Image (tube, rainbow, N blue to C red):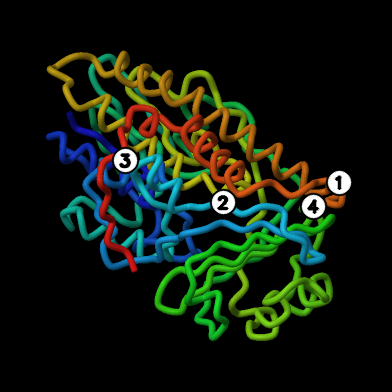
Amino acid sequence: MRVLVIGGGLGGLAVAKGLLDNGHRVRIYEHAERLRDGGAGVTVWSNGTAALRGLGIPLQGVGRQLHSLRAMTATGRLLWEADLDEVTERLGSPTVEIPRRELLYRMAEALPSDIFRFGKRCVGVREFADHAVADFADGSSETGDVVVGADGQRSMVRRTVLGGEPARPTGWASWQGLTRSDLPIAYGYQTLNIAGRDGHCGLIPAGEGLLHWWFDMPWRDDQAELTVADLRSVFTGWPEPVEELLASVSDEDLGFFPHIRHQVPKVWGGPRTTLIGDAAHAMPPAVAQAANQTMEDAWLLSCSLAHDEGRHPEPMLRDYEQQRRPRVAKVSRTAALTSAQRRTPLQRIGKFPRWIATRSQVISLRSGSNILRGLTPPTVSVGVA
């Protein structure tokens, strides 16, 4: 089939790879003039690395495989620690922190260069009995058998095909960055999450001395964005190495990311259209699953369209959506609930044993995943540093 992928982010590149490998003719239409390689780090959990492996996108030589996940309070009290090596063993796929740009470039390297059409802003999609048409701002149009909306939270494909309200703010935002650091945590293998009543932060090594860090705060869209000086004031007295990190970064390192959430629709497209990633299910980053759910979308949609045999695509598109929706809706609800609970007085929360925290990670990842529920734990070798 001729498949038009609208959007050249992580999801668009991933689904293009899967569809190409299954014999389809694919083009990616991106509104920017080049690949958008901004952003900080991406935590690719076991379901994400399994989906990337299924798509034939290797991770050798990039990122940092994580061995543990530790959560503590702003007063320094340990809440729990999960053994990610055991999670890897149980689920058959590791957890890796990767700079977003490196993951994007790795995906792009796996695609033919002539697949991209840059400077093509989609302004609408039209569906007909035997084809679909994507219209662009420059007055041009392209015809295909299927259109995949991988165009993010403000998806034009979603608005054209489904209508409805845009994603809504959750009342929180992240200030984050990816910087080289001399702090020991940047050279370790552990994710550190620290939670206070009115703020939350995380620090994750991303390989080669890079540290992905983020600070979550309540925020309304009528408020000004915070500066590093503001963050230093709010997070004074937090456990090491929070103050040391904030002393080492500047406003130029700071990225701003308001949290939003879509209601996951029951149907994601029309007879010849569907959605993947944030176009279908934008969610707050509280459980770090947005990119992982996008990778699962790309993998399952590629599988669903693997053997079209000349059939009309609609049954295959709806089958993909029906399989994905329960899983991604569960993850989206969990992310929203986790974000809402961040103001819970933490002194009421007791410490969890390591085995419970580890098992909870396994259960949570498997319950929100399509690929892990059918995956037997093979010997996995991702090859990251």
Pointer 1 or 3: first along the chain: 3
Which residue in the protein does label 4 denote?
A: 220
Which residue in the protein does label 2 denote?
A: 82
Do callouts 1 and 2 mark residues in contact (Cβ within 8 Å)?
no
Q: Nearer the viewer, mark 2 or mark 3?
A: 2
Residue at 32 percent of width and 30 percent of height: 301
Percent from the top left, x then y, of residue 314?
Answer: 31, 16
Which residue in the protein does label 3 denote?
A: 5
Do callouts 2 and 4 mark residues in contact (Cβ within 8 Å)?
no
**Residue type at tag 1:** Arg
Pointer 2 or 3: first along the chain: 3
**Residue type at tag 2:** Ala
Which residue in the protein does label 1 denote?
A: 348
Do callouts 4 and 1 mark residues in contact (Cβ within 8 Å)?
no
Q: Is residue 141 visible?
A: no
Pointer 1 or 2: first along the chain: 2
Local SS, label 4: loop
Q: Nearer the viewer, mark 4 or mark 3?
A: 4
Percent from the top left, x then y, of residue 88?
Answer: 40, 48
Q: CA distance from mark 4 to mark 1?
A: 27 Å
**Residue type at tag 4:** Arg
Local SS, label 3: strand
Percent from the top left, x then y, of residue 155?
Answer: 49, 40
Pointer 4 or 1: first along the chain: 4
Q: Nearer the viewer, mark 1 or mark 3?
A: 1
Local SS, label 1: helix
Mark 2 crowd level (few <14, some 14–19, many ≥20, 10 Å Cα): many
